[in-house]
Amino acid sequence: MTATHLAKTYPMKNKPDFLAVNDVSFEITDGRVMAFLGPNGAGKTTTVKMLLGLITPSAGTIAIAGQPATPRSLRSVGAVLEGSRNIYWRLSPTENFEYWGGIRGVSRRTAIDRGVGYLDRFHMADKARQPVRELSRGMQQIVAICCALIHQPQLLLLDEPTLGLDLMAADRIEAIIRQLAREQHLGVLLTTHDMAVAQALSDDVLMIEHGQIVFRGETQTALRDFSAETYQLHFSAPLTAQAQTDLAALGTVALTAPDAAQLTLAQQDCLPMALKILATLPIDTITKQQVDLGTLFKQIIQSHQKAGADHADRD
Amino acid sequence: MLTAIESEFRRSFLLMRRYPTETLAQIILAVVSFYALIAGGQFMAGGPLLGTRITDLVVGYVLWMLVLNTVGDMGFGIAEEAENGTLEQLFLAPLGPFQLFLIRAVVDLLTSLVFVLLMLAGILWLTGLRLHLSAALLVPFFLALVVALALGLLVASLAIVFKRINQVLSIIQFGFVFLLMIPFDSGIMVLQTIGHFVPLIPMFSLLKMLLHTTGQLAMSATAQLLFWCIVNTAFWLVLGMIAFRQATAVARRKGTIGHY
């Protein structure tokens, strides 16, 4: 699925138009999981819904398998949307498989066999005939994922699949997504605030802030590159404001305690200058940090917000 | 499409079977309400309702029940889907929302039809009334079903855009009772013309005519009424289809398929 220059503007009464998504382009490829990350209100769900045809873009195009997206091409797509019940709670999992498979062109027998096959693999075969409302939240989400895959799509869009789940349930969902994505060579777009899940699952990462893409890349490459520039600093006395400003000029500084900070350099060339500054400070230890996706995300978003604030100040 | 039709029938059947007391209670309530209507009417009239009057009541009540059920199923049904979150998933069906909701409207209508026929059997048994049934009744009745379907699409359109339409639905459902009471076929030109375009009114008139007439039908009057039945059906069907397509376009543009 390819999104090209997608944009969405909402007209506002007595206010300037609200630009929810601004010139977003990316591609979801077979067999790869893309984590789509962004703060609340950044435009993730709006983008996902435009991909699914639930929101009409103000600009841009969407293509599936090289062809402009149409309702028919949704045969290739399955989705589990956030904040919603994607299945009927008054029906059992089997009855949901029949229904959602049927409206997507799957015969009753095939839908039941596939769905029950999934339940069997996820050790939920005994729940097949129980009304969904009687299942735990995690089990409901598993059934929703199974329903989204009942017609064997090539693309799967998951909007916050682990939201509201406890740790065990979230781990289980993560394992299921990984297993299904690999086995069925699915292209997956996953939006989540759970950075551990995003890091564990994703091959690629895409970050959005205020409707614009601020970062894209392969997850492991990005983590490796950013780890090269991130250091955990401990001082024997609280860090002064001047020292923070001096270090911030070389990258981003996040105070983790009055006497501790995480420094991410804008580039590796800044290391000698950073060491020069640190030599004048009461430094205790300097430890090279293995960055996780959460830290990377915060740094990218903060530096984008900082660049935006600087730009506004200049204006 | 066949798998979708089967799915919708099956879902409707499962929900009815899962809540049998709800279904049975609705039928009993409809029959008892009609009986109360008859008793009230007789009390007001100071004597039994005779001949054509009670026949007209039965026909009007059956048509009203059809509208009540279809409007309720489509309108409240879609509002409930939006609240539950499943409406967006329905919009992801490769058939497209128009075809899917058309299938759903047909299924709901056929379910309503079973309900209405059971209700009618109950009413006829309770009142002892005998209707002069003929094959000719099927034509206006079928056209009435199509208009009910079109009303279902109209109401679905409102539900997709506005979501919470409970009060509007109540106005439509009970407003229709008053429409049935207006004597559109009284001979007053303006009323007659308006009546040709009020949903189900030409069908109501034709059904009454066919049920009242035991001998030879007046062919020109029948043909004229049949013509207006067809015009009425086409009018509301086109309106329903246009309204639905517009509603889905508006909801997609505003990004409000899943919520208000």
Image (cartoon, rainbow, N blue to C red):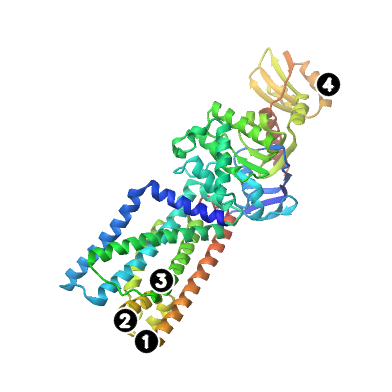
Q: Amino acid at mark 2?
A: Thr
Could you confirm whether marks 4 and 1 are on the same chain?
A: no
Q: Which residue type carries mark 4?
A: Pro
Label 3 element class: helix
* Viewer-proximal residue among A260 and B149: B149
Q: Are marks 1 and 3 on the same chain?
A: yes
Q: Are marks 4 and 3 on the same chain?
A: no
Does the image show residue B198?
A: no
Disc 2 + disc 1, Cβ < 8 Å: yes
**x then y, percent, for residue B237:** 50, 69
Q: Chain of mark 3?
A: B
Q: Disc 4 sits on a residue from what chain?
A: A
Amino acid type at circle 1 is: Ala
Q: Are marks 3 and 2 in contact (CB under 8 Å)?
A: no
Q: Secondary structure at mark 2?
A: loop
* Residue B141, numbered circle: 3
Res A203 seen here: yes
Q: On the rendered image, what quadrant is the N terminus of chain B found in?
A: bottom right
3D distance between C-alphas at marks 1 and 3: 19 Å
Have a look at marks 2 and 1 and say if they share a chain.
yes
Image check: A15 left or right of B154?
Answer: right
In the image, A22 versus A91, the foreground residue is: A91
Q: Which of labels 4 and 1 is toward the front?
A: 1
Q: Residue at x 23, y 66 (%)?
A: B127
Could you confirm whether marks 2 and 4 are on the same chain? no
Q: Which residue is mark 2?
A: B213
Q: Which residue is mark 4?
A: A272
Tag 3 and tag 2 share a subunit: yes
Q: CA distance from mark 4 to mark 1?
A: 105 Å
Name the residue carrying label 1.
Answer: B218
